[in-house]
Image: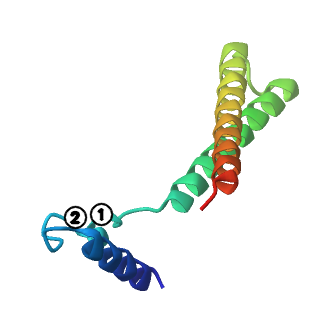
Amino acid sequence: MKAAQLQRFRQAALQQSDDGGNDLPDLEAATDGPGFGDTLERAIDSVNESQEVANEKVSAFVAGEEQNLHEVMISMNQAKLQFELMNEVRNRGLDAYKKLMQTRI
């Protein structure tokens, strides 16, 4: 499906191009690498992992296993900041989606 879409985009661009499409980039080469969904999934996994680490450190501190309060507070703040960043990215993505859906074709 992805290759068929790329071919259609390339053909549409060739039809609009004045020079026969010689200056068009290779779309297949440009789309190699991790996709947006993969990147987003890794970011969410990272946020989840930092939340789990913070929870483990808090539990260890309450149980008396962890003596360094500074490390516990730092891990809690890191988890909080990562979650806030993820939430802001989500909000911006939803705003972009809403604007895109309001666009007239």
Against 66, residue 68 (above or below) is above
Q: Nearer the viewer, residue 66 or 17?
A: 17
Q: Position of residue 45 (x, y in %)?
A: 63, 51
> Residue 4 occupies which quadrant of the picture?
bottom left
> Residue 63 occupies which quadrant of the picture?
top right
User: How far apart are labels 1 and 2 at the CA level?
Assistant: 8 Å
**Residue 30's mark?**
1
Q: Position of residue 35 (x, y in %)?
A: 47, 62
Q: Amino acid at mark 2?
A: Pro
User: Residue drawn at (72%, 26%), measured in percent from left and top?
Assistant: 76
Q: Nearer the viewer, residue 55 or 104?
A: 104
Against 66, residue 51 (above or below) is below
Q: Position of residue 7 (x, y in %)?
A: 34, 82
Label 2 near label 1: C-beta < 8 Å? yes
| Marked residue nearer the N-terminal end (1 or 2) | 2
Q: Position of residue 19 (x, y in %)?
A: 13, 69
Q: Nearer the viewer, residue 73 or 44?
A: 44
Mark 2 lies on residue: 25
